[in-house]
Image: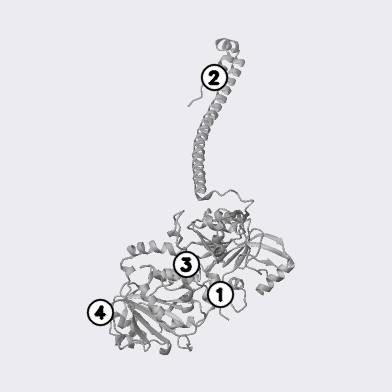
Amino acid sequence: MTPRIRGNDYSALTPPRIGSWTPSMRVSVVIPAYNNQAKLDLTLAGLAGQTYPAELLEVIVVDNGSDPRLTLPELRPAGTRLIQCDTPGRANARNAGLAASTGDVIHWLDSDVVLDRESIEAHMRWHHLAPYLVVTGYLRFSSAELPSPDVVAGADDLTKLFEPSEPHEWIVDLVERTGGLRQQAHRTFSLHIGGATSVNARLLDVAGPMDDKLFLGQDTEMGYRLAQAGAAFIPEPLARGYHLGPTMRMRDKEPITRVSHAFIADRIPQYRWLRSHPGRQWLVPYVELVVDADGASYEDVRATVDAALAGTLPDVGVVITGPWDTLTPERRAPLTDPRLDLALIHGHYLHEGRVRLAREAGPTKAPFRLRVPAGWVPGEDTIARLVDLAVDDGYGLISVLLAERPVELGRVESALGRTGGTGANVTNGTNNATGTNNANGANGVESDAGRGIVSARLERTAAFARAEIAREEDEDVVDVVEDTFGTIWVDGETYGFLPAADAPKIRGRRSTYRALQDAEAEVARLTKEVERLKGQVGKWREEAARWRKNAVEFRREIGALRKELGALRKSGGFRSAVKRLPLAAYAKRAVTRKPKT
C-alpha cells in the first residue's frame, strides 16, 4: 500500500539512515549548461564521488549552445552523457535532458553546483518511500577560490573547500516559518528550485515539462504544476551543496522579481497578491466551474454560469460539458429541434472568453474545481466562501447539500451496479436542478436511505491527484482524499445556493461595486453626522452646566432674601422695606435676568 500523508505533513514517513539501506531506483541527474567548462568539471567531480550506487546513477549534461562546445572531463560518473540543445533557455535545456532521461527520479542540478558526496543518497532515501515526493536540498553560496576537480572528488568535507559561504536565506526562512513545510501546504511548491531538487518521474508525466515560454520563474511555475499533480514537498538538510558564486537573483533581485512577477501572475493563481485587479482574466483561473449541459435547459445552465461569473471572486473559469460535436444546425424547423437547448447554450457562450465548451472537463491546472448542477445558482459570495473554507482548513473536498428527493429502488441498484460502491456516494453527479445523474457530475445517491441527494462539490486539484496516485485498486478516490486532506459536508442554503426559480436577479460585480461604493459613502456621511451631533451634544451639555450654575446662584440669593425678610419682620421695619422695594418686583427682576456666561 502506498504510504499516505496528510497534506504536506510528511512526519509519518521515516527515511533510512544514510548508508544503512539498499537502493533500487534509478536517478537521472539533468544538468543544463552554458559555457563555463571549469565549473561544470567541478560539478561532475562532485557527482563522481557520490555514495549512491553508480549503476543507478545517470547524468545527462545538456549543452545549451556553448561556444566553444562543452566536453565531458575524465573525472565524471560512469553513466554520464552529453547532449546538445541549441535553443536558448534553461527550460528548453532541461526539457531536452528530461526527454533523454531513463530514471525513476529526475534530479535537477545546475552546472555551477557541487554536491556533498551523500546528497544524492539523501534525496533518494525519500523517493523509495512514496511515489509523489519532491525533495529539495540546501545550497550555500560560496565565493571561495575554485579547487581542482581531483580535490573535489577526494574531499570528505566540502566545507574545507568552499567556506566561507552564505545560506539560501529565503528557503531557510520558508522552512522555518512553515514548520519544515508541514504547515501552510498551499505554498510549499515554492521550494522547487532547479539547482538542487529531485522529482519522481511519475509526477512529471502528469505535470508535463517546464514552460519554455517563460524566461524567468520556470522553477516556481514547475513547482506549482507539480503540486497540482499531487506532490508533497520535503526539505532535506542532509542533501547539501555549494553554489559557485552568487545566483542571478542575488545579483539583480529587484529587476528579476519585476520580470518574474509579470509572467508568474498569469500561471500561479495561489499568488493572490499578484492578482489584485477586480476584473482581469488569467491564463490559469483560481477556480474552475464545471456545469454539465447534457439534458439541461438553456435557462438552467445560464442561471448557474452567469451567477458564477458575476460573483465577488472574479478569478473564475467555466467549463460547460456536453455533446457539442453532435450539434448540427437545423435550418428548416429550428424550434422543433430536440437539441435546441444545447444549441442555444453553445451559441450563447461560444465567444465568452471565460467559458470553454468541452465534451469532458478533463484535467485542470486550477487549484480548485467546483462542480455545480445546472439550475442551482451560487450567491455573490458563495464561491469565495467555499474556497476560503478549503484554504483555511485544508480540505480536499467540500460537498454542498443542495436538495434531497425520493428515488426509485431500481435506480439505486442500477447505480450501485455501475460503480461497485456501497457507501453514500454512488454516482458522481447531477446535470440539473432535479438531480438527474450522469457520469461526470457532482452528486451522489444515498442508497441506504432511498433518497437522492442533489449536491455541488469543491475539489482541491492537488488532493484528487494525490489520491489517484495513492489509492488501491477498486478503492473510492474520495476515501483517499479523506485520508490525505479531509472532506466535509456543508449546507447549500447556508452558503448561498438557491434554485434558479428562487434566485435573486444578478447584479454583477459592477453593480456590486457601485452598491459597495454607495454604502461606503453612506457610512462616511453618517459618520460625519455622528461627529456633528457629538459636537452639538457637547454644546448642549455646556449650556446645561451654565444653567445649573446659575440655578445654584439663584437659590443662594433667594436664601439671602429670606434671611433679610426674616430679620426685617423681627425688627419691625418690614413695612417700610416693602414700600421701598416690593418683594414681587425684586423676585421678577431676579428671575428674568440673563444667566452669566
| Residue at image mark 4 | 68
**Viewer-closest of 475 and 292:** 292
- Are the residues tagged 3 and 2 within 8 Å (C-beta)? no
- Which of discs 3 and 4 lies nearer the camera? The answer is 4
| Residue at image mark 3 | 187
Q: Secondary structure at mark 2?
A: loop
Q: Secondary structure at mark 4?
A: loop
- Which of discs 3 and 2 lies nearer the camera? The answer is 3
- CA gap, disc 1 and disc 2: 94 Å
- CA gap, disc 1 and disc 4: 47 Å
**Viewer-closest of 542 and 33:** 33
Determine the residue positioned at 43% across, 87% down.
56
- CA gap, disc 1 and disc 3: 21 Å
- 564 w.r.t. 506: above or below: above
Query: First in sequence: mark 1 or mark 3?
Result: 3
Kindly tell me whether residue 189 is visible in this rendering. yes
- The quarter of the picture where residue 257 lies is bottom left
Query: First in sequence: mark 3 or mark 2?
Result: 3
Q: Mark 2: which amino acid?
A: Thr
| Residue at image mark 1 | 468
- 525 w.r.t. 489: above or below: above
Q: Mark 3: which amino acid?
A: Arg
- CA gap, disc 2 and disc 4: 111 Å
Query: First in sequence: mark 1 or mark 2?
Result: 1
Q: Secondary structure at mark 3?
A: helix
Q: Mark 4: which amino acid?
A: Pro
Residue at the far left: name it. 68
- The quarter of the picture where residue 292 lies is bottom right
Q: Position of residue 397 (x, y in %)?
A: 58, 66
| Residue at image mark 2 | 592
